[in-house]
Image (cartoon, helix red, strand yellow):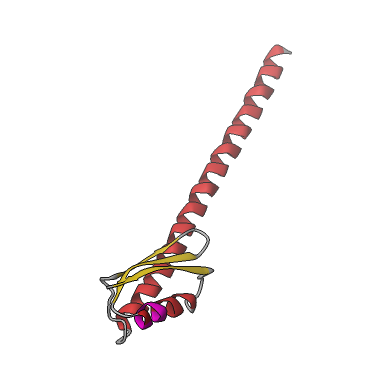
Amino acid sequence: MKNKFGFELLLIGAILIGEVSHADQDKNNHQSMTFIKESAITTKIKAKLAKDQQINTLANIHVATDAHGVVVLSGYAKTREQADRAVVMAINTEGVADVQNHIKLK
């Protein structure tokens, strides 16, 4: 009887360990997908800024995206119009939930 009870406990423990391991794997997969999404949004915005003849300040405007799709623009622009144009480009990018503008004028 003790052996049967011990075996049942061992079996339950193995199942629980498998579930915890699976939960950790799901968490890691979610984190990886979030990072990919953030990187994709950031890359799309940087590409738009690089192509735009009116801005053309890719080296001066920095783009960061958080896990919730919030984009932070920072760095420097030559004019307020350039800064505003960068914000509009970011807002109009797929996946962006909000844009925080921290761009300063040179």
Is-magenta flag for residue 90?
no
Total marks placed:
0
Reply above or below: 48 against 74. below
Q: Name which quarter of the figure residue 83 lies in.
A: bottom left
Residue 55: % across, % down? 31, 82
Q: Position of residue 87 (x, y in %)?
A: 43, 76
Q: Quadrant of residue 84?
A: bottom left
- Name the residue located 46 percent from the left edge and 64 percent from the top edge: 37
**Residue 97 in picture, x, y percent from top left:** 54, 69
Residue 51 rendering spot, x and y as whole percentages = 31, 83
Q: Residue furthest bottom?
A: 53
Residue closest to the eye, 10 or 104: 104
45 and 100: which one is in front? 100
Q: Residue at x 28, y 81 (%)?
A: 56
Tell me: residue 18, above or below residue 86. above
Residue at 34% across, 77% down: 47
Q: Is residue 43 left or right of residue 25?
A: left
Q: Residue at x 60, y 39 (%)?
A: 19
Relative vertical location of residue 63 with respect to residue 31 in this rendering, above or below: below
| Image side of residue 66 versus residue 77, left or right | right
The image shows residue 17, relative to residue 43, as above or below, that is above
Observer-nearest of 44 and 33 = 44
Residue closest to the far right: 1
Foreground pick, 89 / 6: 89
Q: Is residue 82 magenta?
A: yes
Q: Quadrant of the N terminus?
A: top right
Question: Magenta part mainly helix, strand or loop?
Answer: helix
The quadrant of the rendering that contains the C terminus is bottom left
Q: Which region is colored magenta?
A: 81-85
